[in-house]
Amino acid sequence: MASHPNLPDLAPAHHLAGVAASALCRSLGLPPEDREDFRQDLLVDLLTRLPAYDPAKGEFGAFARVCIRNAAALIAGKARRQRAARHPRSLDDAVPNTEGLTLGDTIAEADGYGAWCGQSTDAIGALERRLDLERAAGAIAPEDYPLCAALSEHTPHEFGEQKTMPRMRIYRRIREIRLRLLAAGIPSAA
C-alpha cells in the first residue's frame, strides 16, 4: 500500500488495534469472532483523530497507542453499561402481585419458542389431531398399514409402478380405507 507523504506509517497502528481488540474480547468475555469488528472500530476511531496528530509533539506510535487505548476503554465501558442494563429473567420467576403465576405462564403459546420454530401453537387443534389419528388407526385394518406407509412417501401411481401390487387393487383399497375412515367420523381430506 502506497503511503501518502503527509500521512504517517499506519502499520504499527494495525498491530496495536489487533492487540487491543483481542484484549477487549478477553476482558468482556466475547467470542474471538468479535475481534475483527473491534479492531476496525479502533482503527476508524484512530483515523478520525488523525488530523489532531502533530509530528512535532511526538511519535505517531505513541499517539496511536493513546487513541486506541482510549477508544478501547470507551468500547468496554459501553459494553459493560449495556450488560448492566439487561435484566436476565427466568420463565420460572414469579410475577409480582399474583398468586403463584410465573413469567412463563404469561407468555401465550402463539408467542412462545415453538411458534418461532414454525410449530403448531394450537394445543386444542393438536389434541384433536392426535385423537383423530388414534381413531383412524383403529379404523384402518392392520393389513392396510403397509399401503398407508407406502402412500405417505409415494403417490398411488408411483407405488403402482413399483409392481408390488396391481394399480387397480391399490385404488380399491384406498377407496375402502376412505369408507372405513368416513364411518369412523373422519372425512376425506381430498
Image (cartoon, helix red, strand yellow):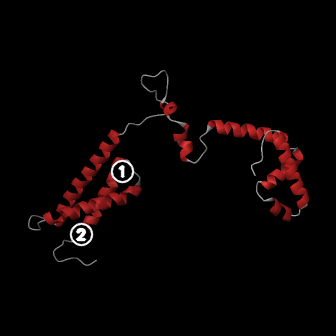
**Which one is in front, 73 or 41?**
41
Visible residue check, residue 164: no
Crowd tier of the residue under label 2, counting other residues whose Cα lies within 10 Å: few below 14, some 14–19, many 20 or above: some
Give the SS element for disc 1.
Answer: helix
Q: Residue furthest top?
A: 99
Which of the marked residues, 2 or 1, is nearer the chain's N terminus?
Answer: 2
> In the picture, which quadrant includes the N terminus?
bottom left
Q: Are marks 2 and 1 in contact (CB under 8 Å)?
A: no
Crowd tier of the residue under label 1, counting other residues whose Cα lies within 10 Å: few below 14, some 14–19, many 20 or above: few
Q: Find residue 87 and name its label.
A: none
Question: Which quarter of the figure has residue 138?
Answer: top right
- Residue at left offset 61%, top offset 43%: 120
Percent position (x, y) of residue 50? 18, 65
Give the SS element for disc 2.
Answer: loop
**Which one is in front, 3 or 104?**
104
Q: Which residue is mark 2?
A: 10
Three-letter code, disc 1 = Arg
Q: Is residue 80 left or right of residue 127?
A: left
Q: CA distance from mark 2 to mark 1?
A: 25 Å
Three-letter code, disc 2 = Leu
Percent position (x, y) of residue 85? 33, 39
Q: Which residue is mark 1?
A: 26
Percent position (x, y) of residue 103? 47, 31
